[in-house]
Amino acid sequence: QVQLVESGGGLVQPGGSLKLSCTASISLEDFTVVGWYRQAPGKERELVATVPRFSRTEYADSVKGRFTSSRDNAKNTVTLEMNSLEVEDTAVYLCMGRLRWSGAVSWGKGTQVTVSS
C-alpha cells in the first residue's frame, strides 16, 4: 500500500514562513503527478500546487509568488515552501500523488498549518 506522510506543519505568525515535506513509501517516479491540497474548516478541499513528472509546477492563484513546491526524486520527497503566510492560509495541508500505472490517487493524512498572531 502506497503511503504519503506529511510533516512540517505548525503555528506561525502572519508574514512568516513554513516548509512542509511529504515523503512517499515508493519512488516519486511512480507518480505522474504529486502535489498539495488544503482544507480549511467548513470549506472544500482546494488545490495548492501540482508538480507533474515532466512539466512545470502549477499553483493556485491565491498562493502564486508566495509558495514554491518541488520534488526530490532521490529522497522520494515533495516539499512546499510557504512564505508571506496569511491568516487565510490556515488549513490542513494534504499531500497527494497519482500513480503512473493505475491512475489511482493516494493521499497523506495531512499536517495542520495555523497562521495567527
Image (spheres, rainbow, N blue to C red):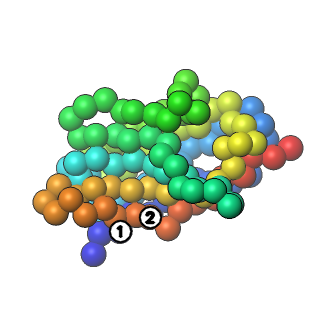
- For this orientation, the residue located farthest to the bottom is 1
Tell me if mark 1 has few (under 14), some (14-19) or many (20+) residues whose alpha carbon lies within 10 angstroms of its own.
some
Q: Quadrant of the C terminus?
A: top right
Horizontal arrangement in the rendering, residue 43 relative to residue 22 (left or right): right
Tell me, for residue 108, which label it has, or none.
2
Image coordinates for residue 23, horizontal then vertical, percent: 39, 57
Tell me if mark 2 has few (under 14), some (14-19) or many (20+) residues whose alpha carbon lies within 10 angstroms of its own.
some
The residue at which mark 1 appears reads as 3
Image coordinates for residue 83, horizontal then vertical, percent: 63, 32
Given the image, on which type of amino acid does mark 2 rest?
Gly
Determine contact: label 2, label 1, CB under 8 Å.
yes
Q: Is residue 12 visible?
A: no
State the count of labels: 2
Give the camera-side residue of 23 and 97: 97
Given the image, on which type of amino acid does mark 1 rest?
Gln
Q: Residue at x 35, y 68 (%)?
A: 3
Q: Is residue 5 visible?
A: yes
Q: Quadrant of the N terminus?
A: bottom left
Instruction: Please tell me which of labels 2 and 1 falls first in the chain.
Output: 1
Q: Residue at x 16, y 63 (%)?
A: 102
Image coordinates for residue 68, horizontal then vertical, percent: 48, 33
Cα gap from disc 2 to disc 1, whole angstroms: 7 Å
Is 56 placed above or below 46 here? above
Q: Residue at x 28, y 40 (%)?
A: 52
Provide the secondary structure element on which disc 2 rests: loop
Provide the secondary structure element on which disc 1 rests: loop
Horizontal arrangement in the rendering, residue 24 relative to residue 42 (left or right): left
* Quadrant of res 89: top right
Is 109 placed above or below 95 here? below
Q: Residue at x 53, y 62 (%)?
A: 110
Horizontal arrangement in the rendering, residue 35 relative to residue 40 (left or right): left
- For this orientation, the residue located farthest to the right is 117
